[in-house]
Amino acid sequence: MNDSIQSTADQILVFTLDELSYALLLPTVLRVIHAVEVRRLPKAPEIISGIINIQGQIIPVADIRKRFGLAEREIELDDRMIIADTAKRKVALFVDAVTGIKDLATRQFVNSKEALPFAEYIRGVAKVDDELILIYDLEQFLSLDEEKELEHALKTKNK
């Protein structure tokens, strides 16, 4: 096997929120789209802004600003949405901007359990091009209770 070829598992999609850099592992990212109108979903967990319809598929929109304790702000025309795949469902995330895909060497990545044991939604930290990037853990974006609440809200919506 050729070690010089990087797999997508070694890459991250970098995005910004309030000028801070965050990332998702590239294999979890399905696509990036311009921000679209979000329809409110009654009885959804607080972290869920609502739902969107992408090619006939209903996708919940998670407000990661709330999850990270960042100030809320109005959605702007230049904002983007990242459509990503978790183990349980597809989700959309509002972000200020997507700055690109970066290669991630093993030596650039520090597991959050070692460096930031208190950061439950962060998979790790990467230093890429002299910038620290927090890598978001999509598998933990909803607690068990929030997951059940969302499931109930989605089922109620379809009735």
Image (cartoon, grey):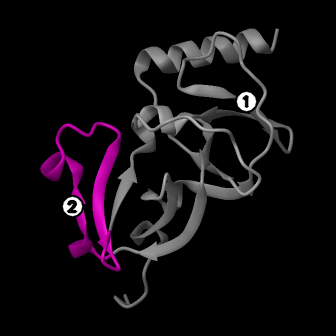
Q: Residue at x 74, y 48 (%)?
A: 35
Q: Is disc 2 in contact with disc 1, using a CB cutoff of under 8 Å?
A: no
Q: Which residue is under mark 2?
A: 110
Kind of residue indicated by mark 1 = Ile
Please give left or right for residue 95 compared with residue 75 in the image: left
Give the image quarter of residue 58: top right
Q: Residue at x 68, y 53 (%)?
A: 79
Q: Which residue is under mark 1?
A: 51
Please give left or right for residue 18 compared with residue 126 in the image: right
Kind of residue indicated by mark 2 = Val
- In terms of sequence position, does the residue under pointer 2 or pointer 1 come before the other? 1
Residue 70 lies within the magenta run? no
| Secondary structure beneath label 2 | strand
Q: Residue at x 61, y 17 (%)?
A: 151
**Percent position of residue 147, x then y:** 51, 21
Please give left or right for residue 43 compared with residue 54 in the image: left
Q: Which residues are magenta?
A: 105-131
Q: Residue at x 32, y 49 (%)?
A: 123
**Percent position of residue 111, x then y:** 22, 55
Quarter holding the C terminus? top right
**Viewer-nearest residue: 25 or 45:** 45
Q: Kindly give the residue lying farthest to the left in the view shown.
A: 114
**Percent position of residue 65, x then y:** 50, 38
| Secondary structure beneath label 1 | strand
User: Is residue 141 something that shows in the picture?
Assistant: no
Distance in Å between CA atoms under marks 2 and 1: 33 Å
Q: Residues within 10 Å of mark 2 (few under 14, many from 20)?
A: some
